Amino acid sequence: MIIKFMTLIMRSRISNILAPSGIKDIAVDNALRSLGNLRAIGGDGAWHLTEITKRNRLILEAFVTDNPKSKDL
């Protein structure tokens, strides 16, 4: 029961973040599923994200102010 309640709170928070950013047509489940295709490649301390789709870029910009492509992981 606690896990379901926490999940509801997290989904509500994600929805509240996505709505004002102009991404109203993407449901929370679809946004999380879309971000699931991000991959990091590299080794020896130098990690980089693979190509980020436009949809993923919009979702990430709603949560993060920095461009994830320009930062090492």
Image (cartoon, helix red, strand yellow):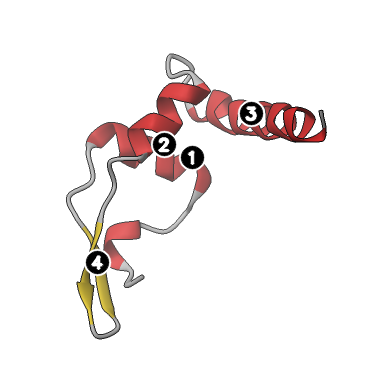
Say how many tags the image has. Answer: 4
Residue 12 in the image: x percent, y percent?
68, 26
- Does the CB distance between marks 4 and 1 fall below 8 Å? no
Identity of the amino acid at label 1? Ala
Q: Which mark is residue 47?
A: none
Identity of the amino acid at label 2? Ile
Whichever of callouts 3 and 2 sits on the residue coming sooner in the sequence is: 3
Q: Is residue 47 above or below residue 53?
A: below
Label 1, label 2: how many angstroms apart (C-alpha)?
5 Å
Whichever of callouts 3 and 4 sits on the residue coming sooner in the sequence is: 3
Q: Which residue is mark 3?
A: 11
**Left or right: 33 in relation to 13:** left
Residue 7 in the image: x percent, y percent?
69, 32
Mark nearest the camera among 3 and 1 is 3
Whichever of callouts 4 and 2 sits on the residue coming sooner in the sequence is: 4
Q: Which residue is mark 2?
A: 59
- Does the CB distance between marks 1 and 2 fall below 8 Å? yes
Q: Secondary structure at mark 4?
A: strand
Mark nearest the camera among 4 and 1 is 4
Identity of the amino acid at label 3? Arg
Label 3, label 1: how many angstroms apart (C-alpha)?
15 Å
- Does the CB distance between marks 3 and 2 fall below 8 Å? no
Q: Which residue is mark 1?
A: 62
